[in-house]
Amino acid sequence: MITSRTDRVVTYAILVFFTVIALVPVLGILSTAFASQASLNTGFSLPDGLHWSNFVDAWQRGHFGTYLRSSVLVTVVVVVASAALSTLAAYAFGTMRFPGSTMLFYVFLIGLTLPEEALVIPLYYDLRGAGLTDTYWALILPQTAQSIAFGTFWMRTYFLGASRSMVEAARIDGCSSWTTLWRVLVPVGRPAITTMVVITFMWTWNEFLLALVMVTSESRRTVPLGLVFFQGQHSSDISLLAAGAVLVALPVVLVYIALQRKFIEGMLSGAVKE
């Protein structure tokens, strides 16, 4: 299909427009984070200098080292566990036929339809009865269950679209179902798996409601919850708050930058084509 020069100009103009809309808040936060704490300028304005001490002060006064450790622990366990379990479940739903498979898959999808706000109160009482509140398990188990619902749905689509001839060739070569999954389908499906991992990472890292309800000890607070407490203590220090927000968002940005190529490839393809 041949596009005219006018169409290309209009397309690029629209892309530039929405790029500016997306970048202005980010640049505003960065400029505020680097501004002097005594400065009254906030938003999109050039700072009076690069005050890196804002990040040091926010890190020390906000105890972000403790919060980051908790977030890293919870996020890594949730991402690894949900990715492994989702891949296994999706492989079964996508390549195997057994009685009740369709109904069981719809049960998994219920996890995508129920809002977290409707479940958090009964979930709190269940975990309290099991003695798990104010522990990392109170954050890990519910988020793993939620992520498995999405991961199973996402990876099932990949397995349904995977090359049948490749799977059959592996079976002819004597590969078991386990070997076919881990030696054939998983390496080829890395873009789809990477997309699932990045989305799960962002959801888990930014989770706030569960941490607010389930955790009371400061040592187990995650960074979104810690940022709220930090905001309450330093509501007048705008530059310090902006620096804290940058520290909280930085890991997500770094993970996305590191995996963006596979992430975009997985979003566009999501399946192996013959």
Image (spheres, rainbow, N blue to C red):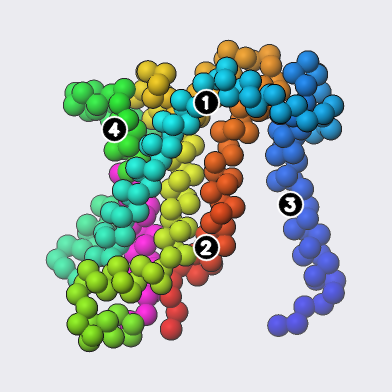
| Image position, residue 8 (x, y; %) | 80, 70
| Image position, residue 172 (x, y; %) | 22, 86
| Image position, residue 47 (x, y; %) | 82, 29
- Camera-nearest residue between 243 and 268: 243
Identify the residue at image location x=38%, y=37%: 74
**Residue carrying label 3:** 18
Q: Main secondary structure of the magenta part?
A: helix
Q: CA distance from mark 1 to mark 2?
A: 30 Å
- Camera-nearest residue between 161 and 30: 30
Q: Is residue 177 left or right of residue 221?
A: left
Q: Please identify the quarter of the rendering in which residue 95 is found.
A: bottom left
> Quick one: label 2, few (<14), some, or many (20+) residues within 10 Å?
some
Is residue 160 on the magenta stretch? Answer: yes
1 or 2: tag closer to the N-terminus: 1
Q: Nearer the viewer, mark 1 or mark 2?
A: 1
**Residue carrying label 2:** 262
> Quick one: label 1, few (<14), some, or many (20+) residues within 10 Å?
many
Q: Please identify the quarter of the rendering in which residue 135 is found.
A: top left
Q: Amino acid at mark 2?
A: Lys
**Residue carrying label 1:** 64
Q: Nearer the viewer, mark 3 or mark 4?
A: 4
In this picture, which residue range is highlighted in magenta? 145-164
Is residue 149 at all visible to an observer of this figure?
no
> Mark 2 falls on what kind of element?
helix
Q: Which mark is residue 137?
A: 4
Identify the residue at image location x=43%, y=37%: 72
Q: Nearer the viewer, mark 1 or mark 3?
A: 1
Q: Amino acid at mark 4?
A: Trp
